[in-house]
Image (tube, rainbow, N blue to C red):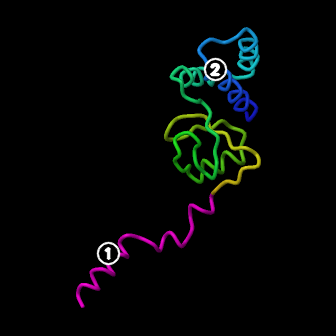
Amino acid sequence: MIRIVEASIAQQKIELPTRTLTPAQETERRALRANVPEGILEKFSQLVGRWKKAVAIVRGGVCGECHLRLSSGTLASLAYTTEIHYCDNCGRFLYLPEDEPLGLASSASPSSATKSPAGKRTRRAGARGL
């Protein structure tokens, strides 16, 4: 399934920059589309038809198109399964490059849990009482 997403990335590089394809680009586009199942092609065509990238590359646990953090379950599925996954927010196909870290460690850091706005309000209120 990863090859399908990689074929889709190559296809969107051909289709997005221009509305009119050269004969060589059209031949390459047909060859790439032959490797992708019909249901995926339909969704791909809908997104590209609206001049949007259909495939988002995941970097640091974040969707490369809508820039929202992906759930840990989605990230794990991307890393350990060969199924096609979609971004829950923007609906694009997700692609995790092989050399990309999952980005799970930074989302659950204990230091960020201790720095909350509520803690700051409590200190201010206590300072006013003196």
Question: In the image, is 109 to the left or to the right of 84?
Answer: left
State the SS at label 2. Answer: helix
Q: Which of the 4 image quarters holds residue 43? A: top right
Residue at the location (51% across, 47% down)?
68
Amino acid type, residue under disc 2 in the picture: Glu
- What's the residue type where badge 1 is placed? Arg
Q: Residues within 10 Å of mark 1 (few under 14, many from 20)?
A: few
Mark seen at residue 121: 1
User: How many C-alpha atoms fall within 10 Å of the one at disc 2: few (<14), some, or many (≥20)?
Assistant: some
Query: Distance between the Cα atoms at labels 1 and 2?
Result: 52 Å
Residue extending furthest bottom? 130
Q: Is residue 68 left or right of residue 127?
A: right
Q: Where is the C terminus found, in terms of image quarters? A: bottom left
Residue at the (58%, 20%) spot, across then down: 45
Asked whether residue 8 is drawn in magenta, I would say no
Q: Nearer the viewer, residue 24 or 74?
A: 24
Front-lying residue, 37 or 130:
130
**Residue at x-position 70% and y-position 10%:** 22
* Numbered mark located on residue 15 in the image: 2
Q: Are marks 1 and 2 in contact (CB under 8 Å)?
A: no
Q: Which residues are magenta?
A: 104-130
Residue 23 rendering spot, x and y as whole percentages: 73, 8
Q: How many marks?
A: 2
What quarter of the picture does the N terminus occupy? top right
Indicate the position of residue 54 as horizontal and vertical percent values.
Answer: 59, 30
- What secondary structure is marked by label 1? helix
| Front in this rendered view, residue 120 or 105 | 120
The numbered dot on residue 32 is: none
- The residue nearer to you, when weighing 1 against 62, is 62
**Image coords of residue 50 (percent x, y):** 51, 22
Vertical relation: 102 (above or below) 127:
above
